[in-house]
Amino acid sequence: MKANITWQQEGVSFLGQVGSGHSVLMDGAPEAGGKNQGPRPMEMILLGVGGCTSFDVVHILRRSRQEITGCQVEMDAQRAEKDPKVFTHIHLHFVITGKNLDPRQVERAIKLSAEKYCSASMMLKATVNITHDYEIREVGQTC
């Protein structure tokens, strides 16, 4: 896997390009010299964890023949107060939507992702307390 980061020569804006051909603009907060034109690098890490585990959960539930129609992960992360301001805790709340979903299968899919498949979570879990919970919503159910 390859990636390239190029400073945009203004403020603290950087263009990230990955081997698959996609690009993302990252920027800092205005108080750090940024123009708030893109996510912060640490936000990208958080999105990576959420995207990685979501991929796993959807894939596992489909393979388990669950009628999943939606998967959303609401993430809440805390960081250390002092530099380096690493993540200290990440909580992932899964909202799984579908028809007649088996709670045991949903719990199993989340556990398998957390303990076996999600590379991003595995990489961080040595230093970050990562917790999970979930709710199941029947198709057509509103918040």
Image (tube, rainbow, N blue to C red):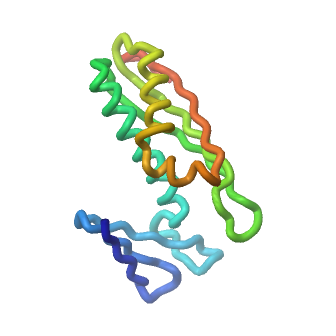
In the picture as drawn, the residue positioned furthest to the bottom comes out as 9
In the image, 78 versus 120, the foreground residue is: 120
Position of residue 38 measured from the top left corner of the image (x, y, whole percent): 45, 66
Instruction: Give the quadrant of the N terminus.
Output: bottom left
State the image coordinates of residue 106 (x, y, percent, origin top left).
Answer: 44, 22
**Quarter of the figure with residue 79:** bottom right
Left or right, residue 32 beside residue 141 = right
Q: In this picture, is 83 found above or below 104?
A: below
Left or right: 127, with 116 as reference point: right
Q: Residue furthest right?
A: 81
Place of residue 8 in the rendered image (x, y in percent of width and height, measured from the top left) = 41, 84
Corner quadrant of residue 34: bottom right
Identify the residue at image location x=39%, y=15%. Answer: 101
Q: Residue furthest top?
A: 100
Position of 87 relative to 14 (above/below): above
106 with respect to 92 (left or right): left
Q: Which residue corresponds to the image point at 37% horizontal and 17% vertical from the top-left? A: 140
Q: Residue at x 47, y 20 (%)?
A: 136
Q: Residue at x 37, y 37 (%)?
A: 56
Report the number of discs. Answer: 0
